[in-house]
Amino acid sequence: MAQESGWQVSGDAPSFYMRYAYAMQEPWTEDLILQARCKDSDRVLDVACGPGLVAGKVNQVSQTNCKITGIDVNEVMLNAARRTRPDIDWYLGSATELPFDDGSFDVVFCQQGLQYFPDRAKGMREMHRVLAPGGRLALNVWGPLERQPFDVIYREGLGAFFGPEALNPSTLGMSLNTYGELHKLALDAGFTGIKVRFENRTARYPDIREFLVGWTQASPNAAQFRTFSEDMRVRFVSYLIERLDSFTDDAGLVIPRENHFLAADR
Ligand SMILES: C[S@@+](CC[C@H](N)C(=O)[O-])C[C@H]1O[C@@H](n2cnc3c(N)ncnc32)[C@H](O)[C@@H]1O
């Protein structure tokens, strides 16, 4: 199913993802969940759920008892989700062909997923279709690369040590972000009450060396990283540490990120 997405991990990447990428996603997740105003008994779908960060937090954050379902195209991500939260219904499938009846959900979430779908307009139409009238959509996508200074430097390291193809996942990850694109996707899919909101926050990692190794192993470039000799790994990490000097303070690595939120009604 890898052709269904430009961002796919394999092997034990989900466990690194939960350790290192969650720290990047998590500060925004509560915000995303609260935006959907979940109520007890709502039927909630987390599209492109990965290992289930959003799905796993909905009831705790909104202090509700919702019925939660997650779907992702990647089996290893879903296996991690199943292990962590066996109480949630997990589905393997594509966001562009959701295996659910019309109007099956009251709330749809999609955290850092839409930008990777092979057909974003179709993904939005599917999220609209499976929502019941009055249902709510809450999603987010990263802001543009030129406003993500850590990622600009990290990609220099990827280009130098992994080659140009290694840039594709992050290029795609930050490729959907203008107000106009997001608003139009939602409007064309039939959503109303569309609100787009840009936010900035800081992620922190106490140990820069550990983070750079973990972050790389959490990504679609993990398999290539595993083929590197120990010497090449050390050179890659040292190359980045030198260039990230201005992003370190007494508490370690500081990563500013811009994230774009979209909320809409069915
Ligand atoms: C960056 S991860 C985000 C995961 C999760 N939402 C989170 O907040 O941690 C992107 C996820 O989108 C999934 N994905 C990409 N294309 C997809 C598609 N067409 N259908 C379903 N999931 C997809 C990937 O498999 C991956 O798990």
Image (spheres, helix red, strand yellow):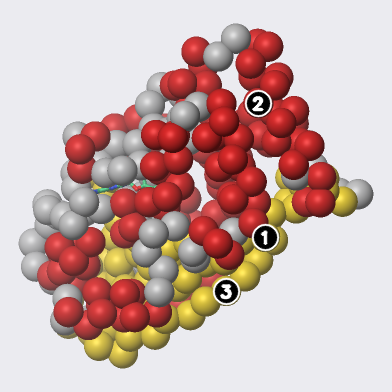
> In the drawing, does residue 119 fall left or right of residue 49?
left
Query: Is the C-beta separation of discs 1 and 3 under 8 Å?
Result: no
Residue located beneath label 2 in the image:
236
Seen from the viewer's position, the closer of residues 61 and 99 is 99
Question: What residue did someone put label 1 on?
Answer: 256
**Residue 141 visible somewhere in the drawing:** yes
Q: Amino acid at mark 1?
A: Pro
Residue that appears at 70% across and 36% down: 240
In which quadrant of the rendered view does residue 214 lie?
A: top right
The crowding category of the residue bearing disc 2, from other C-alpha atoms within 10 Å (few below 14, some 14 to 19, many at least 20), is: many
x, y percent for residue 23? 62, 49
Q: Which residue is mark 3?
A: 199
- Picture residue at 15% right of the left edge, 69% below the top: 125
Distance from Cα at disc 2 to Cα at disc 3: 31 Å
Image point 56% across, 47% down: which residue? 22
Q: How many marks?
A: 3
The outermost residue toward the right is 250
